[in-house]
Image: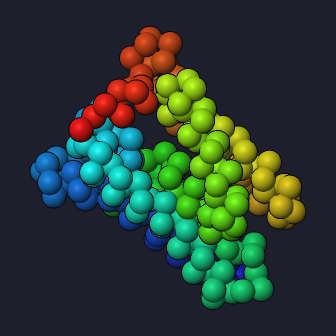
Amino acid sequence: MTFETIIAILLGYAFGCIQPSYFLSKTIRKTDIREHGSGNAGASNTTAIMGWKYGIIVALIDILKGFFALSLIKWIYPDSPNLAYLAGIMAIVGHIFPFYMRFQGGKGLATLIGMAFGINWKLGMIFGSLVIFPALITDYIVAGSFSAFIALPIATYLLEYPIFLVGIATLLLGLIVYLHRANIQRIFKKEELKVSTVIKRR
């Protein structure tokens, strides 16, 4: 493993570990956001528990950390797009497994969108649409998460990144499916938080 690769991994992971939902819930509500709602440290659960104002703040920061992780490495190593991509992936991993939260963070969806925007604004719009439309059609945000992460290895392949990055993207998809197993169970039990419910939250 090269020094440049280590830098990309560490910087990407460090960006991902920034957890606005956790810090806002601790500061504003004096509690841990993971102890409420879906138990997820992300924008949708923050909106459901704390309202739209805080949910939007969390979503923007989670998107920006994926964008800046990739963009920073792209700036440092302009001739190594693979390193920038790797940093974006690691930002998602950092969001899911932040070390100071006992490796229990969010699901990485907003960070994925930010990573896509860092690669190309058109790709960012595509991934944003892959989240929004399935979520609105099914009324479950998990549908948008699945569609976006399913698209990740496909986009990685079509953009002609090396096969090992396609493999990493595929492994990440498998991880996301595993992490959403409780959401799937709640959907069958009709207990999963719906998008329409979150939208009505003030």
Viewed as shown, does residue 19 lie left or right of 144?
left
Q: Residue at x 35, y 53 (%)?
A: 56
- The number of numbered badges drawn on the structure is 0
Q: Can you say whether 168 is above or below 199 in the image?
A: below
- Report the front residue among 164 and 126: 126
**On the rendered image, what quadrant is the N terminus found in?**
bottom right
Residue at horizontal 78 percent and vertical 53 percent from the top: 155
As rendered, which of 103 and 88 lies closer to the eye? Answer: 88
Rendered location of residue 72, percent (x, y): 57, 81
Quarter containing the C terminus: top left
Q: Position of residue 201 (x, y in %)?
A: 27, 34
The residue drawn where x is 77% and y is 60% is 165
**Residue 94 seen in the current view:** no
| 36 lies above or below 71 | above
Residue 200 on image: x %, y %: 31, 31
Instruction: Give the residue at the far top of this rendering.
Output: 189
Where is residue 55? Give x, y as percent: 33, 49
Residue 119, quarter of the rendered image: bottom right
